[in-house]
Image: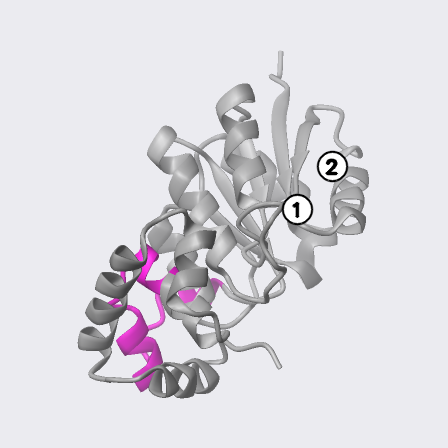
């Protein structure tokens, strides 16, 4: 007898969650057991329910008090928190961000799959089924990016950053101050300064304006 696949949906737009729920309902063996709209809610739901699969967007707020920003910080932090709690967590990213460094950093953070939102209607159910079995699944349109060795200067530099450094890089590129980043990530400003110094050293830069320049050339800033 096939086992029910219990799913946690995480996206900060209720209409998107509703759409995913309707798609998944076509398979009677997939059940959405909870929904969340930010990093904090996602972690709390996972800790309480231990779902089989997490479907998660990268662009989301840290918590209900955070300003909505178009960066990947909330999604990457949710992945980090969930995997710190359960290293075997099976996470599927469904995102509109379909160029590197996004898929690469999601995979580096430990997700098992990455589906683009434009392919979700055709691929979501199959992706959930595969990931529930511990397999990987990537949209055909971006699968070549996961092992792509023909990288730009920006991709090569950003690939050196840890998940936490990439989160801070994204938020600084979006114009957030160190104090605001610290508040959203629930760490001290001193910690953010240390990560900022490390990422600048790795990228060979010395100012926030250079962070913004690299982010624009890498396509991280959403315009």
Q: Residue at x 80, y 47 (%)?
A: 19
Coloring applied to the structure: one colour
**Residue positioned 59% across, 38% down in the render:** 128
Q: Looking at the image, which is closer to me, 70 or 183?
A: 183
Compared to 106, does 82 lie above or below? above
Q: Locate residue 209, reporting x and y percent.
A: 38, 87
Residue 20: x, y in percent?
74, 44
Please rate how many residues cluster around mark 1, counting C-alpha atoms within 10 Å: few if below 14, some from 14 to 19, many from 20. many
Q: Residue at x 49, y 48 (%)?
A: 113
Q: Is residue 42 visible?
A: yes
The residue positioned 69% from the left and 54% from the top of the image is 120
**SS state under label 1:** helix
CB-based contact (under 8 Å), mark 1 and mark 2? yes
| Residue 124 badge | 1
211 falls in the magenta region: no
Q: Is residue 43 above or below residue 94?
A: above
Instruction: From the viewer's side, name the closer residue of 129 and 203.
Output: 203
Q: Main secondary structure of the magenta part?
A: helix
Image x and y of residue 148, in percent: 36, 71
Q: Is residue 208 above or below residue 161?
A: below
Pointer 2 residue: 24
Q: Is residue 144 left or right of residue 154?
A: right
Q: Which residues are magenta?
A: 143-167
Residue 167 screen position, x and y as percent:
40, 61
Q: Residue furthest top?
A: 1
SS of the residue at dot 2?
helix
Q: Earlier in the sequence, mark 1 or mark 2?
A: 2
Asked if residue 163 lies in the magenta stretch, the reply is: yes
- The image quadrant that residue 191 belongs to is bottom left
Res 87 seen here? no
Q: Left or right: 166 with respect to 62?
A: left
Left or right: where does residue 165 sit relative to residue 175?
left
């Amino acid at each position: 007898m096939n086992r029910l696949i219990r799913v946690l949906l995480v996206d900060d737009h209720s209409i998107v969650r509703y759409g995913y729920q309707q798609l998944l309902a076509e398979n009677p063996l997939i059940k959405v057991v909870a929904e969340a709209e930010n990093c904090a809610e996602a972690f709390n739901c996972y800790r309480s329910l231990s779902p089989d699969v997490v479907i998660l967007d990268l662009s989301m707020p840290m918590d209900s008090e955070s300003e909505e920003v178009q960066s990947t910080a909330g999604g990457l932090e949710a992945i980090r928190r969930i995997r710190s709690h359960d290293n075997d967590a099976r996470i599927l990213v469904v995102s509109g961000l379909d160029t590197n460094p996004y898929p690469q950093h999601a995979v580096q953070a430990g997700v098992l799959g990455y589906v683009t939102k434009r392919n979700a209607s055709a691929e979501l159910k199959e992706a959930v089924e595969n990931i529930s079995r511990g397999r990987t699944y990537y949209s055909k349109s971006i699968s070549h990016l996961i092992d792509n060795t023909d990288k730009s200067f920006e991709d090569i530099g950003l690939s050196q950053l840890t998940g936490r450094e990439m989160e801070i890089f994204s938020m600084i590129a979006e114009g957030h101050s160190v104090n605001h980043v610290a508040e959203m990530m629930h760490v001290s400003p001193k910690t953010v300064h240390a990560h900022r110094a490390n990422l600048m050293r790795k990228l060979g830069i010395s100012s926030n304006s250079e962070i913004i320049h690299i982010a624009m050339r890498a396509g991280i800033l959403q315009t």
